[in-house]
Image (spheres, rainbow, N blue to C red):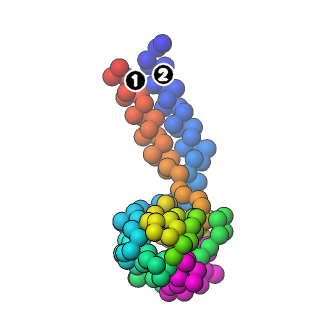
Amino acid sequence: MNKALTGTTAATFGAALATFGVAPELQADIVSLTFNPGSVPWGYGAYNLLNEVGASIYQWNDSFGKTMYALGLSSIDLVQLSQVISPSTFAGTLSIYNTVFSASATGVYYVGFRYGGNVGWFSFDAGGFGGNITYLEGAYGNAGEAVHVGTVPAPSGLAVLALGALGIRRKRSA
């Protein structure tokens, strides 16, 4: 197979993906969240830093329940998958008590939050009685946009172009 043709095809494909909106411009200021640490062991309380936001959540995981407090965030609250969280309408509270998350809570939960004039969401697996709370994913609108719970930003158009260029480089060196 012609190496030049393969590289050109990869570059064209990457450019086409970027052109046709793999990452819509409306989502340009919505970023994926990372968590530090990514889980809270049973019997402990821990600060969980939302790295991209610059604020944290304090989470207890013990026999009293799975209580969550907003530290540095304006508010937090339970939200639903596919819900749209808007800075103009999201209120929330400063904490979600163990009446919501009992010590034996299982399954995936979604939590919305406000930080100043911006909003975001994250999900976690409650882990059940004696299990770890594991943070799964989240997104944050850092320029006042609404976010869709369960939607994590796709790679940007430039990232897709870079992947196309990487494909060209690999093919040429092979």
Q: Quadrant of residue 49?
A: bottom left
Residue annotated with mark 2: 6
Is residue 10 or residue 108 the one in the foreground? 108
Location of residue 133 in the rendering, given as x and y in whole percent from the top left corner: 46, 67
Count the marks. Answer: 2
Name the one closer to the observer, 64 or 164: 64
Report the residue at 44% width, 19% height from top: 4
Q: In this view of the protein, can residue 58 be seen by the observer?
A: yes
In the rendered image, residue 101 lying in the magenta stretch gets the answer yes
Q: Please tell me in which quadrant of the rendered image residue 79 appears.
A: bottom right
Q: To which residue does mark 1 refer?
A: 171
> Where are the magenta residues, as a range?
85-102
Of 29 and 43, which appears nearest the observer? 43
Picture coordinates of residue 73, whole percent (x, y):
45, 81
User: Is disc 2 surrounded by few (<14), some (14 to 19) or many (20+) residues within 10 Å?
Assistant: some
- Distance from label 1 to label 2 (Cα)? 7 Å
Residue at the farthest left position? 173
Is 113 magenta? The answer is no
Q: Position of residue 161 (x, y in %)?
A: 46, 40
Q: Residue furthest top?
A: 1
Is the residue under label 2 in contact with that under label 1 (CB below 8 Å)? yes
Q: Eyeballing the image, is 140 above or below 69?
A: above
Quadrant of the image for the C terminus? top left
